[in-house]
Image (tube, grey):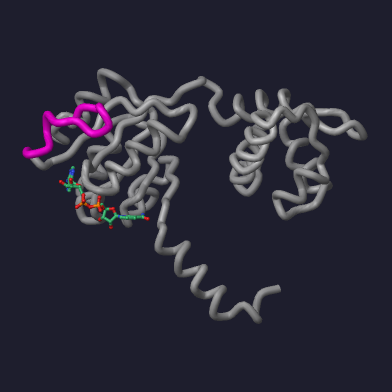
Amino acid sequence: MSNSKVSLPVIRRLPRYFRYITELKSNGKTRVSSSQLAAVMGSTPSQVRQDFNCFGGFGQQGIGYSVDLLYDEIEHLLFPNSHIDAILIGAGSLGATMANFVLTETEGVNLKAIFDNNQNLVGKTLSNIKIHDVETVVDYCQEHKPELIIICIPKAAAEQLAPVILKSGVKGIWNFSHYDYSVYDKSLIVENVHLRDSLMALSYRINHSEDEE
Ligand code: NAI
């Protein structure tokens, strides 16, 4: 399986394929065609085949893909080490929502610890995960080696914490703050999530629907 040069758009489509295939699997379906996948993805059968060819193909043309095989292969691509250990910084409203989301709605990510600088929160728990003093985050990371940090703090705090995050040795940041960590260090793998961008894009599309191709 050669996936050393897979483009970001293909990587971004994998979770959507996985979501649909998970649904098919739980509905007891055993096979799916590239046309069926293309219909839910809003693409073409040839795009689906091209995407899957980046990873070796996943199946024989003509008889469709085995749902079980697709599920196993894509799950392995998304979570090759079965679980990624994560920590979360910012135990406020967003942090509480994201902690609950990661614990109840996602596969492949183990949320191990939460950090905050508010001493009234330190020592308490969120979704049964202990909140630690953010001052201890580097020591924690050096000992437990989480690969992922989820950032749920305001922009100024996120910027201030950038050197700490770099020292922590994590590989990836799921970033809900409005500070762009890749400006600080281009080698960090960062997924920036901005709900407002999504809403603004939706607003634009509602107001300019006649301009869309
Ligand atoms: P909040 O005020 O409820 O929680 C913020 C938490 O961060 C507090 O517990 C606070 O003590 C902690 N904190 C502040 N500075 C810290 C530091 N240096 N180290 C550790 N912890 C620190 O705010 P909420 O609603 O949870 O939002 C957090 C941030 O996320 C906001 O600044 C907001 O702009 C952003 N946000 C981003 C969204 C997105 O789509 N990207 C959506 C919603 C919020």
- The segment highlighted magenta reads 119-130
Q: Residue 16 at what x, y percent from top left?
A: 62, 43
Any magenta on residue 124? yes
Q: Position of residue 82 (x, y in %)?
A: 51, 20
- Front-lying residue, 50 or 31: 31
125 shown above or below 118: above
x and y percentages locating residue 142 in the rendered image:
26, 22
Q: Residue furthest right?
A: 62
Please, which residue is most extreme toward the front here?
Answer: 27
> Which residue is more in the foreground, 12 or 179?
12
Q: Is residue 66 magenta?
A: no
Q: Quadrant of the C terminus?
A: bottom right
Q: Which residue is drawn at 33% across and 49% down?
A: 184
The secondary structure making up most of the magenta span is loop
30 displayed left or right of 103: right
Residue at 35% in and 31% down = 170
Residue in front for this viewpoint, 153 or 209: 209
